[in-house]
Image (spheres, grey):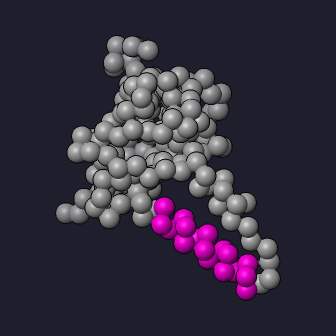
Amino acid sequence: MAEISAFLGSALTTIDPKGRMAIPAAFRNPIIANSNGESSVVFSFNAQGQCLQGYGTERLNALIEQMRRREQIASETGEEFRTELFGGPRFNSTATISFDGSGRLILPKMLVAMARIEKHVFFSGNGTDFSVWGYEHLMSLDDPRLASQQFNARFLMEELGGKR
């Protein structure tokens, strides 16, 4: 039976002041499966979702190839294509980070600030990728589309004894 490489479920972890945290166990194998067997994860800031998106390096390569195809089409049709306009918003706040066997890594301070991560970090599986929010920030958002994530985050926090 093939191993599932989708990002499923939710998890809550912590981050220290230096940006050190562990990727939850349920997310590690899908990351490795989607990163050609390597322990590398890609984090990008998602301005619309006000969170980080995490995924494997294969998806990053696919996004870069998509940009190259759009650039080629623009060249063939005589249209202007500027990488800083198309790729900048997607890639200027993106980092590929290696993690150890326990899933530990150091998240860049800029990404921590962008996602408004304080102490608790909420992970939410989206199938092909996963979202990462600072718990406090997620709970402050008034967006009905986030009700499931907020319920899961609140539930996991209560299981921790409500330690905020």
Secondary structure character of the magenta stretch overall: helix
* Nearer to us in this view, 85 or 131: 85
Residue range of the region highlighted in magenta in the rendering: 60-76
Q: Percent position (x, y) of residue 80? A: 79, 73
Residue 115, located in which quarter of the rendered image? top right
Q: In this view, does 92 lie above or below 11?
A: below
| 153 left or right, relative to 76 | left
* Nearer to us in this view, 123 or 91: 91
Q: Can residue 146 be seen in this view?
A: no
- The residue positioned 57% from the left and 26% from the top of the image is 137
| 93 left or right, relative to 97 | right
Q: Is residue 43 above or below residue 115?
A: below
Q: How many marks?
A: 0
Q: Is residue 118 visible?
A: yes
Q: Percent position (x, y) of residue 144? A: 63, 33
* Nearer to us in this view, 43 or 129: 43
Look at the image and tell me in which quarter the C terminus lies: top left
As drawn, the residue found furthest toward the left would be 1
Look at the image and tell me in which quarter the N terminus lies: bottom left
- The residue positioned 73% from the left and 86% from the top of the image is 76
As drawn, the residue found furthest toward the bottom would be 76
Q: Percent position (x, y) of residue 11? A: 37, 34
Examine the structure image and report whether residue 104 is included in the region drawn in magenta.
Answer: no
Q: Percent position (x, y) of residue 64? A: 55, 67
Q: Is residue 120 above or below residue 56?
A: above
- The residue positioned 66% from the left and 56% from the top of the image is 88
Examine the structure image and report whether residue 68 is included in the region drawn in magenta.
Answer: yes
